[in-house]
Structures are given as structure tokens and as C-alpha cells.
Amino acid sequence: MAELGLDSLSDLRPLFATLAAIPLLLWLVLKWKIPAFTALIGVSLIAALAAGMSAESAYATITAGMGGTLGFIAVIVGLGSLFGALLEAGGGLPKLARLLIGQRRGFGGQVMAGLIGLVVAIPVFFDVALIVLAPVVVALARQAGRPVLAFGLPLLAGLAIAHAFIPPTPGPVAVAEILGADLAWVMLAGLAAGVPALLVAGPVFATVLERTGQLPEARLDQIETEAAPDDGVSGHMVLALILLPLVLILAQALLALTGANGALAGALAVVGHPFAALMIGCAAAGVVVAGKSQTIRGRVRLGIAEAFAPAGAVILVTGAGGAFKQVLVDTGAGGQLAGLVLGFGLTPIVLGYVLAVIIRVAQGSATVAMITAAGMTAPLLAGQDMTGFAQALVVIAIAAGASALSHVNDSGFWLVNRIFGLSEAATLKTWTVSTTLLSITGLIACLALGVLA
């Protein structure tokens, strides 16, 4: 206990309370099906009281943790949901897919299918993007005379990476806020680790399965959907709209590194902030969609209303994760956990990854896994002198861990199973293995990039 700075076993009370909180959280979610938000808040309170905090202090800690986290997250997730709803309702996402794929039918077409998933799922939720883009890969497979999953697996890999690795999707935004990482650096780290993960888990894996005759056939009748409207937004315009806020955020961050203080730097400091960049993106998308037909505008109104439902759930769970993190900090459990972990020689990247994998496999939700793992990893970063890029790599390592082994307790597993008409065994053989390859490759990339950070 000396290396932890503890004089007696009673000093370990906060650490024991924290270690007991994780299985309690999983038990509440898995056994009693309690919503993640309620379970996280309840476990945070129990852990605080068990660690020796008074009831008044425990409530104050939970309030401060949730409020401090939501101040940034709520705006980002809300604007991101609005932006995605505008793009999806505009009817241009399938056109963007066809534009980028072009006449590519071989390995290049598979790579482009993955990149399409990556690009489209940045502003649009995973399930919506999959439903919209599945018909595109069906048409592509038919034209190429190849199995649907030859292009479907790369698409899924791209969607999964964007969902977990690239802001302004809720997961990485939440983890970045909890760990205090800059979103621009998280974007760069997510792309740097995500692209090799996409290639391995998507085109390479699908090609290996196809060449060895192990690629299952999808039931095409499950994928047939209505074609995109002819008067929808063009593919070129959709691509420009998606890139607009991302470019503004990255440009502001890169210019800030130069230490410039001129008019351009001042202007980018305003428009390159994530709040402003997403508002500009929403305004531009709104102007583009407003010029379309009444049918398109009606779809936009409905899409906006539907987009805020999942966003609200994500915001609440994220806030609860912030409360749990604050309990770790204020009770001192986080510092004790950090000392214990560092004593074993684990780095924040490895610890965050392992915690995320364990929680993900146990309860299924990638978002809950990311937020819980981030709360437990945050104390390790507090006492270390880390660059912005190094902090971002910890975010991506947690995202990679939370992407691993999607199986029957994950709603994404059943969505893929239903959309592509696969059996449970075939879904495990394809989607589950793909997410695991994605996760491992992402970790390896983070460790390799960590040498440079």
C-alpha cells in the first residue's frame, strides 16, 4: 500500500467502492434491465456514499459532474443530430455513395464503400446511415456480380469507425469531454487510426472471406427500399456540406498551433469552434434543403423531430458518465486507481482499451462502454504531462475497445442481422469478427502513433 500513499486498509475504501461499482452497474443493466442513465446515476451515488462522502457532498458531486459534462456535450450532440437529419432528409446520401463509387467494382469499390460509410456516418446516426446506404451496396454488388457482403462489410466497417472514432458523433465527443481532449486532435487521431482499421476490418476481411468461399449470402429482399428522390440534394453538395464543419474545426486547430494572431486567426477562432462550425453546417444544409420540393421539406421536419429522440438518450447517458467520473475524482478513488494501474505498468491507452472491451462485451452498448471507461481512465491523465495528440489517442483507444466483439447483446448486431437477412451464426462470422478486427487494428494504430505523440 505504500506505493499508493496509503497508511491503512481503511484508506482503500474509495478504491474498493469504485471496483465494486462496475459489477454493480453491469448487474443492474443486464439482470434488471435498468436504463443505463438511471443505473449510472444510482451507482455513482452508491459509490460516493460507500467511499465515505456525506449525502450532501455526494449529491453536489453528481450535480457538478453531470452539469459540467453536459454544458458542452448537449450543444454538440444536439447540433450534430440536427445536421444529420437535414442531410438524411435531403435525399442526397445515396447519390453521394454512387458518386464516390463510380464504376469501381473490384477492391477499389470495396475501399470506396468503406469510405462512404465513414463519411456519411459522421453526421448521421449508424442505424439511419445503414438503412439509407444498404440499397446502394446491393445495386453495386449486382452490377459487379459479387456477393452483397463483399461491399456490405466494408460499408459496415466505415459506419462503425465513424460512429466510434470521429467527432461530432456522440461517443468520441463524450469521451473527449470527460478526458479533456481537444476535438480537432480527436478528429485527426480518429482518422489516423480509423483508416487502417477500416481497410483491415472491411475490404481485406471481406476479400479473404469471398476468396475462401466463406462469405454468406445476404437475403436481398430484406434490403429493398425506396430509391432516393430525383429532386434531392446532389452528391457533390452533400459531400461539401459534410466537410464544411470538419474543415472549419481542423483549420482553426491547425492555425492555432502556428501561434498566429492576425485577422484570419481571429475569424477562425470564432467560426472554427465546434459550436459555430456545426451551426454554420446546419444553416448551410437548411438553405440547400429549403430550395427543394415540398415533399423534401416535409421529410426534413419529420427527420428533425425523430433525430432528437436518440440524441436525448445519448446526452443523458453522457451526463451520467460525467457524474460517475466526478465521483472518482472527488472521493480520491481515481487517484488510487491511477496509482494501482501505473504500478502494474499499464499506460492510459492500454487501460482505457481493456476497460472499454470488458464493459462492451458484458453489456453491449458501445456508448455506455466508452463513457464508463473514460470516467475510470480520466484520473490517470490528470497527473501526466501529455500532448493534445496523446490525449486524443487515449480517446480513440477507448473507442476502439468499445467497438470490439459486437454480439447478441448489442442492438447493432441485430440491426445488421435484419438489414442483410443473415442468420445469427452468419452475423457472428461476419459482423462480430469485423468489429473485433476493427478494434484490434485501432489499438495497434494508437500504440504506434503514441510513439510519435
Image: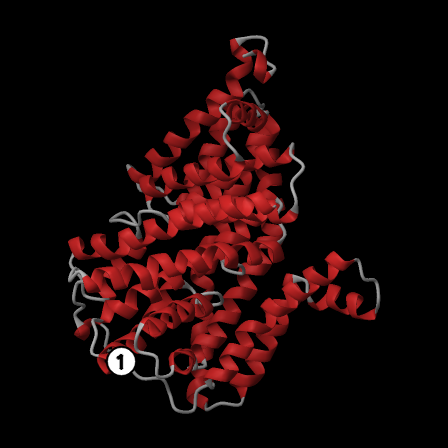
Labels in figure, total: 1
354 lies above or below 305 = above
At x 44%, y 26%, the residue is: 19
Outermost residue toward the top in this view:
8
Q: Quadrant of residue 296?
A: bottom left
Comparing 235 with 222, the one in front is 235
110 lies above or below 194 = below
Q: Which residue is mark 1?
A: 139
Q: Residue 78 in the image: x percent, y percent?
A: 54, 62
Q: Quadrant of residue 284?
A: bottom right
At x 29%, y 59%, the residue is: 205
Q: Residue 430 in the image: x percent, y percent?
A: 24, 57
Which amino acid type corresponds to the residue marked 1 in the rendered image?
Answer: Ala
Q: Residue 24 in the image: x percent, y percent?
A: 38, 30
Comparing 152 with 266, the one in front is 152
Decide if residue 324 is in sight here. Answer: no
74 lies above or below 203 = above
**Colouring convention used in this rendered image of the protein:** secondary structure
Please tell me whether mark 1 sits on a helix, a strand or a loop: helix
Does residue 62 appear left or right of residue 122 in this picture? right
Comparing 7 with 99, the one in front is 99
Decide if residue 72 is in sight here. Answer: yes
Q: Quadrant of residue 258?
A: bottom right
Comparing 107 with 147, the one in front is 107
Question: Circle 1: is it few (<14), some (14-19), or many (20+) Cα within 10 Å?
Answer: some
Q: Residue 257 in the image: x percent, y percent?
A: 73, 57
Which quarter shows the N terminus?
A: top right
Does residue 118 appear left or right of residue 361 in this picture? right
Does residue 269 appear left or right of residue 403 in this picture? right
